[in-house]
Image (cartoon, grey):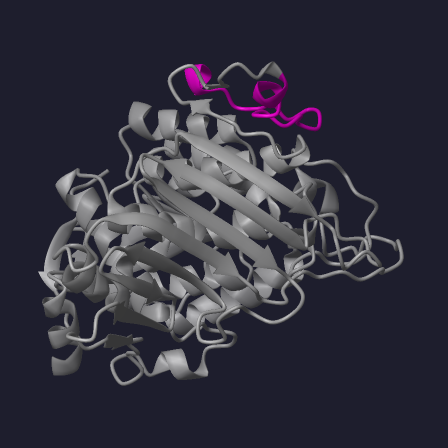
Amino acid sequence: MNQLNRREFLKGSSAFMTLASFGLFGMDFKNPDGPIRTALIGAGWYGKSDLFRLIQVADIDVVGLADPDKNMLEAAGKLVSERQKSGKVPPLYENYQDLLAKEKPELVLIGSPDHWHALQAIDSLKAGAHVYLQKPISVDVIEGEAILAAARKYNRVVQIGTQRKSTPHLITAKKEIIDTGKLGKISHAEVCCYFHMRANGNPPVQEVPDFFNYELWTGPAPLRPYDGLPHTRWWRTFMEYGNGITGDMCVHMLDTVRWMLKLGWPTQVTGTGGIYVQKDGKSNIADTQTAIFEFPELNVVWQHRTWGNPVDPEYPWAFKIYGENGMLAGSTMQADYFPYGDGEESIHYDVVYEKEEYPEDVTEDRIELNAAPATRLHMKDWLKAIDNNTRPIADVEEGHISTASCILANISMELGGRPLRYDPKSMTVIDDPEATAKLRRPYRAPYQHPEPSKV
């Protein structure tokens, strides 16, 4: 890949002050031979959102989109033509492998459903691309080990979409509260999600529409009877394609706590839960779950319910870090430091928006306005790491640890709640052959499960 050169691109004084305060000056990355060749695999909502954030901060040429839904693909192509500088509709591909072979992109963004992440990431790395991979990085632990092995083997930079590490108000809270030691000894953290986000209908089996390649969309996952387009929330309600609410939402907050407290692998993971309340639909993901991630002298406790009210209405999807002197709560929308004594004031941190600097945010369909600044910073960090041949803030190894920890919580729940101790060196669950066997999910033929030693 050609060297990616940088030039300042800052848009407005307020953006400058915001980014400068975090030590992350905005840089536009420009290839001396022209815009950076970029592709998107998975042209749904969040894949497009990631691509649009990259278009805002870098000089890129979108050379291909891939998706097995022709209608979604064509709509995405039109939107990209309206956003990228060239005004061109990029080449459209049903199969991502054709895109990689013909277009040879330098950057690949992957926004497909979780069950495709491993194969698409590894194939992109083999094709020579640097990768921006959405979380969770995998649906089983060994897939994650294989992605990590491929990233290191092919010396590519892989940034994971755990962008809380690039969320402005959380960066500031970490620097002012955690890094200065205000909390004192920290020995407990809680992470949670109480969103009512578990789709649970009973749609009938129906004919697959001509514009949708359901076989290709399913890929290595089990082939469920087709009961409607899976794109909006529906696929996430099945363990065939992901890891439930824990895999989707805990991964973000656990990863944030690990980043703030400089934690590695948990020494032990325990999970309990199941479908306790919402039993009337097809969904097979847990509606209630608790997990304990144990670290030396510190437990991180996860809880989700897709029913009922949140414990703290101000923090329905959040983390809370408890120290001997106070507590830090944080979410995508805010953060608060609460000291325990009477002699110190609490501190509030608000979400940062950049609607003036990026007015196109306001009219973008389904955009998460609160997350857009974080994703832009995340993209810039990725490109800076590529330019400097360094590890990004959400390096694939960190994404793998957070993802695998959530998967282990699900395996523990499936096995009746027994504690699991994963050894990343041997890639086994210590003294537990039954749990070790669940580190690899069966793949549907003719797809082959990736192995770390063979990428």
Q: Is residue 337 shown above or below 278?
A: below
Quadrant of the image containing the C terminus: top left
Q: Which residue is situated farthest in the front direction here? A: 342
Depth check: give the residue in front, 233 or 69. Answer: 233
Residue 141 located left or right of residue 323: right
Q: Is residue 49 magenta?
A: no
Residue 182 located left or right of residue 442: left
Residue 403 appears in the rendering: no
Residue 399 located left or right of residue 449: left
Residue at 74% over, 48% down: 284
Q: Main secondary structure of the magenta part?
A: loop
Q: Looking at the picture, how far across and down is residue 1, in whole percent?
A: 24, 38
Q: Is residue 436 magenta?
A: yes
Residue at 41% over, 37% down: 294
Total marks drawn? 0
Residue at 14% over, 72% down: 10
Q: Looking at the picture, how far across and down is residue 110, in whole percent?
A: 46, 48
Depth check: give the residue in front, 79 or 192. Answer: 192
Depth check: give the residue in front, 325 or 106. Answer: 325
| Quarter of the figure with residue 73 | bottom right
Residue 298 appears in the rendering: yes
The boundaries of the magenta stretch are 434-455
Q: Looking at the picture, how far across and down is residue 390, in whole percent?
A: 17, 39
Residue at 34% over, 67% down: 86
| Quarter of the figure with residue 166 | bottom left
Q: Looking at the picture, how far across and down is residue 225, in whole percent?
A: 84, 45
Depth check: give the residue in front, 330 or 245. Answer: 330
